[in-house]
Image (tube, helix red, strand yellow):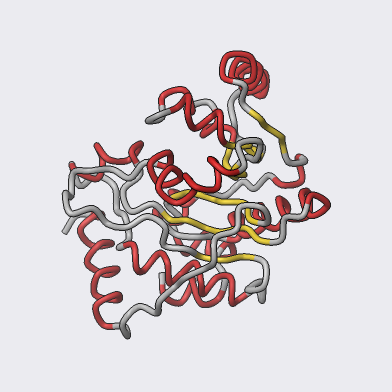
Amino acid sequence: MSGFASLFKRWRNTFDASAEEAELGVELNPLVQIYYFGSFNPVHVGHLKVAQEALATFASQGFEEVVFVPSPKPPNKMQALLKKEYPMMPLPMRLRLLQDAIDDIGAGNTLKVLALEKEQGNPQKATYTAETLQHYFADFLRDAPEQKLFLLMGEETLETLPTWKDAPWLMAHVHCVVMPRPSHQSLYKSIKTQVLLEERYGLSLSRLKPEATFPMNATSLRSNKASHEAWLTPTVAKNF
């Protein structure tokens, strides 16, 4: 059995054998919430630390929560998913592990999990951040056009923004909270991209301090859990 098939079978069996997924819901309030979209496949300590750093940075502006929004089928991974080259855990399992990780560190008052994005009826259809934001925040943005939706993302994600679906709309309505990456190939390139996006699209952006960096990534965890288990909270390490 291939590595992909083995991983997916284990995850699927774990999910099927577990109790029905608890309903995860959070009241939306973009005036106090920062939204963190991603695969979280799996969630690790780095994700939690950078979310807490973002809150510490923006607490003075009234932000009280970071909301994790796992994507069912991220556009940048669709080709690999369709070819079965990328082992993506079922969405309910990723939601549950996120909640487990938050509970493990006792951060339930400030870190939340929200299933804003659902599995599509068409298995070949990706989920797009802009469509999700337009769906849930259209009234908010219409009534408060001066307000921005705060999104937490990595430097490598920032550089891809112009290629995203409805990119001009997205960059007009969000404030990007960018986390530095120690492994990122060029800070100069990232800053150059930032200036370009600010000038061309009017993108609003701020960067977290270098202390918010984390060297771990989910790919390394999936390929060698034993070597990187310290990056998983206890419950996630047990169930991943």
Residue farthest along the right direction in this orientation: 60
Percent coordinates x, y for residue 196 in the rendering? 60, 15
**Residue 129 in sight here:** yes
* In the depicted structure, whether residue 58 falls above or below residue 17: above
* Number of numbered tags placed on the structure image: 0
Quadrant containing the C terminus in the rendered view: bottom left
In the foreground, 128 or 224: 128
**Which residue is pictured at 25% across the width and 62% down the height?**
8
Residue 121 location, quadrant:
bottom left
In the foreground, 143 or 115: 143
User: Would residue 90 appear left or right of 206 to someone viewing this image?
Assistant: left
* In the depicted structure, whether residue 206 falls above or below residue 61: above
**Which residue is pictured at 57% across the width and 50% down the height?**
216
Percent coordinates x, y for residue 134 in the rendering? 43, 42
Residue 185 location, quadrant:
top right
Quadrant containing the N terminus in the rendered view: bottom left
**Residue 182 in sight here:** no
Residue farthest along the bottom direction in this orientation: 19
User: Would residue 27 appear left or right of 186 to someone viewing this image?
Assistant: left
**Which residue is pictured at 37% across the width and 55% down the height?**
117
Residue 131 location, quadrant:
top left
* In the depicted structure, whether residue 2 falls above or below residue 208: below
* In the depicted structure, whether residue 197 falls above or below residue 239: above
In the foreground, 198 or 29: 29
Percent coordinates x, y for residue 151 in the rendering? 58, 44
Percent coordinates x, y for residue 223 in the rendering? 39, 53
